């Protein structure tokens, strides 16, 4: 049944995408996040939906008519992305031999960067920015909605791990938390009552899905996200009340397993799982010390082929006593993951990109603050996009999440938001050419 529904979707939307390049781009973004084929079991599971809409988008863009009707408004973020792609190519080319996922990960990163580089062509004013925010929220929270409902139906015993694309429960929880501020923005500015009600429901159910992951990192990320939102909000009391309401839900809905899992946070130095991650950080930093410019290649830190070579090398963390894991575990940190894979130069580029939303956040607040009545929506959106990045940067410290597409989309969206405010005359001209 699922396959037939997915097939019906293709039959309906592929012709629509072929008729309009903007629709094709939006479906490309949405299809990558929702990964619909992960929920099918038959012939449709082999159809690459995201790639299909990507090809349609690129073919449409190549036509003279499309090129004549679009304007490109870039920024420094896109220069950094280009440098990351070039540096990644060099790292993958000169990587250690035997890295099974080296070129696969590089190609995925390039696909993500390509979509981000094209975003300013299609997302350039308030209406389109709002649509894109809704698309990101719906694409990601669809998974949370499914697991949240299972959590309710099971009376709190459901263990959510997400689809295979997300890796494990910890990655899944972080990505869901990143999407929750986007739902808050939609709720805040939606005019239709039914949209606000649906968004509020999706927010609560997604929150339950996060609980269902039993992720310790999710708790820390949620606290950081809530603190940022409350600190940045003009309605701080409302934010505090919402945080208290969610806090009250936890003991009512969470399972005993969740509490047992959270209780181990205070003894992290004695936790075998956490100390195993520190061992992986040692190995990743040791690879970077020997390959400071290009690193060892994508997922070098968990490659059996070079594990013995770096198994006992302390790297930058020789002062920390750690156990011998006995196997090449993943880096379990966006920072050490990039450090081992791409070297110190790659880490610098990665940090410049991932912290750029906060630079743009400062600029947006300064500019929009001059006219808060008309541009208050931009300040609110920028605050919440930054909250998503807080989740990523805090939670990612213990997760191998460096190459997932969602944070890259949020980084780009913050840049697009700044451009739409800083150069409104460009946006006005582009808006006249909307389909």
Image (cartoon, rainbow, N blue to C red):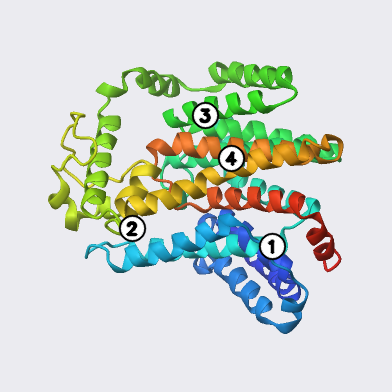
Q: Which mark is residue 358?
A: 4
Callout 4: 10 Å neighbours few (<14), some, many (20+)? some
Secondary element at image label 4: helix
Q: Which mark is residue 298?
A: 2
In front: mark 4 or mark 3? 4
Location of residue 172 with respect to 241 vertically, above or below: below
Quadrant location of the C terminus? bottom right
CA separation in Å, label 1 and label 4:
20 Å
CA separation in Å, label 1 and label 2:
31 Å
Secondary element at image label 3: helix
- Percent from the top left, x then y, of residue 302? 26, 51
Dot 4 and dot 3 residues touching (CB under 8 Å):
no
Q: Residue at x 17, y 32 (%)?
A: 323
Callout 2: 10 Å neighbours few (<14), some, many (20+)? many
In the rendered structure, the answer to whether residue 168 lies left or right of residue 147 reads: left
Q: Which residue is mark 1?
A: 73
Q: Residue at x 71, y 20 (%)?
A: 236
Q: Of marks 1 and 2, which one's residue comes earlier in the chain?
A: 1
Q: Of marks 1 and 4, which one's residue comes earlier in the chain?
A: 1
In the rendered structure, the answer to whether residue 422 lies left or right of residue 288 reads: right
Q: Which residue is mark 3?
A: 211
- Percent from the top left, x then y, of residue 184? 70, 35
């Amino acid at each position: 049944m699922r396959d037939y529904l997915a097939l019906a979707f293709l039959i309906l939307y592929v012709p629509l995408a072929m008729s309009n390049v903007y629709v094709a781009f939006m479906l490309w973004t949405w299809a990558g996040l929702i990964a619909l084929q992960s929920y099918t079991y038959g012939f449709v599971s082999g159809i690459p939906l995201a790639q299909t809409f990507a090809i349609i988008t690129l073919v449409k863009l190549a036509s003279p008519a499309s090129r004549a009707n679009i304007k490109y408004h870039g920024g420094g973020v896109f220069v950094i992305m280009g440098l990351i792609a070039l540096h990644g190519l060099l790292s993958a080319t000169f990587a250690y031999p035997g890295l099974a996922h080296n070129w696969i990960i590089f190609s995925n990163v390039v696909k993500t960067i390509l979509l981000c580089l094209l975003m300013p062509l299609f997302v350039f004013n308030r209406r389109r920015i709002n649509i894109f925010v809704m698309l990101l929220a719906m694409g990601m929270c669809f998974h949370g909605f499914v697991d949240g409902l299972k959590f309710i139906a099971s009376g709190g015993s459901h263990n959510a791990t997400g689809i295979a694309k997300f890796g494990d429960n910890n990655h899944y929880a972080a990505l869901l938390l990143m999407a929750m501020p986007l739902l808050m923005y939609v709720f805040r500015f939606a005019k239709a009552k039914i949209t606000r009600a649906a968004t509020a429901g999706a927010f609560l159910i997604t929150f339950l899905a996060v609980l269902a992951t039993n992720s310790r990192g999710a708790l820390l990320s949620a606290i950081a996200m809530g603190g940022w939102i409350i600190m940045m909000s003009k309605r701080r009391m409302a934010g505090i009340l919402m945080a208290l309401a969610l806090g009250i839900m936890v003991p009512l809905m969470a399972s005993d397993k969740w509490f047992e899992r959270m209780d181990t946070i205070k003894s992290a130095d004695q936790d075998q799982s956490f100390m195993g991650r520190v061992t992986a950080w040692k190995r990743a930093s040791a690879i970077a010390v020997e390959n400071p410019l290009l690193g060892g290649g994508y997922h070098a830190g968990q490659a059996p082929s070079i594990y013995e070579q770096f198994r006992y090398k302390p790297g930058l963390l020789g002062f920390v006593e750690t156990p011998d894991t006995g196997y090449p575990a993943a880096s379990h940190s966006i920072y050490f993951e990039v450090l081992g894979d791409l070297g110190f130069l790659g880490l610098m580029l990665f940090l410049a990109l991932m912290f750029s939303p906060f630079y743009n956040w400062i600029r947006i607040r300064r500019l929009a603050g001059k006219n808060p009545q008309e541009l208050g929506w931009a300040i609110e959106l920028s605050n919440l996009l930054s909250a998503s990045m807080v989740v990523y940067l805090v939670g990612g410290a213990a997760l191998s999440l460096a190459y997932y597409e969602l944070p890259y989309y949020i980084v780009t969206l913050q840049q697009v938001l700044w451009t739409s405010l800083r150069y409104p005359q460009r946006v006005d001209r582009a808006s006249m050419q909307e389909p």
